[in-house]
Amino acid sequence: MQAETNAGRHEESGRLRLNRTVLTKLVVVACIMFGFGYAMVPIYRQVCEALGINVLTQKDGTVAPPANTQVDKTRTITVVLDGNAQGPWRFRPTQRSIAVHPGEMATVVYEVVNTQARTVKAQAIPSYAPQSAMPYFKKVECFCFKEQVLKPNEARQMPVVFFIDPKLPREVKDITLSYTFFEIGGAVAAQN
């Protein structure tokens, strides 16, 4: 009888030790996963910046507007506008497309409406199709250059001033400019 009790205690002690080991491993794995998820944003920014895709901080904000003598009136490029929302708002271009001559300054407007009863911080990321047109699409002014803070139920019109470099290959006749507008985590200071 005594031997059975000791064997039972030994077995229970082994199970407890095994359970503690498994729990410790699960906590370590959960901490590593959280750390990896937290580190993904800066890693994503660095990788995208290095590859020149979906760059959060645009570098073409210092682009000088072209002189009117650079406008190529022999061809017209259709810029199709698109907007995607990832968060608590409505986001869209105010027009579907615009026809421009390479070298000609153009302005388009995107509209965003915060549908929440709280202040949100957001960022827009542009993308282009065909991707080969990206180096020729020069934004002089854009809401995507910085984070946007939207008050509760605020509606805002946001311009994009751009020109297309006349060096754009002649076979490109259409460019799609698409923005994805998404909420950025972190607390937003209360505003009066």
Image: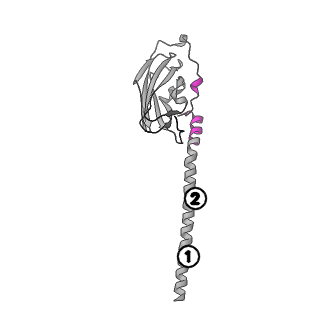
Give the residue pinned by disc 2. Answer: 28
Q: Residues within 10 Å of mark 2 (few under 14, many from 20)?
A: few
Where residue 159 appears, as percent x and y from the top left, is 48, 24
Q: How many marks?
A: 2
Q: Amino acid at mark 2?
A: Val
Q: CA distance from mark 1 to mark 2?
A: 23 Å
Residue 175 visible (yes or no): no
Q: Residue at x 47, y 31 (%)?
A: 179
Estimate the x, y position of residue 177 in percent, counting from the top left: 46, 27
- Front residue of this view, candidates 186 and 179: 186
Q: Nearer the viewer, residue 77 or 54?
A: 54
Q: Residue at x 44, y 32 (%)?
A: 154
The image quadrant that residue 98 belongs to is top left
Mark 1, secondary structure of its residue: helix
Mark 1 and mark 2 residues within 8 Å of each other at the beta carbon: no
Q: Is residue 144 magenta?
A: no
SS state under label 2: helix
Nearest the eye: 191 or 82: 191
**Where 96 sits versus 115, above or below?**
above
Residue at 42 percent across and 25 percent down: it is 80
The residue that appears at 47% across and 28% down in the rendered structure is: 130
Question: Magenta stretch?
Answer: 43-64
- What's the coloring here? one colour
Query: Which label is found at residue 13?
Result: 1
Q: Point out residue 167 in the picture as x, y percentages from the top left corner.
A: 54, 19
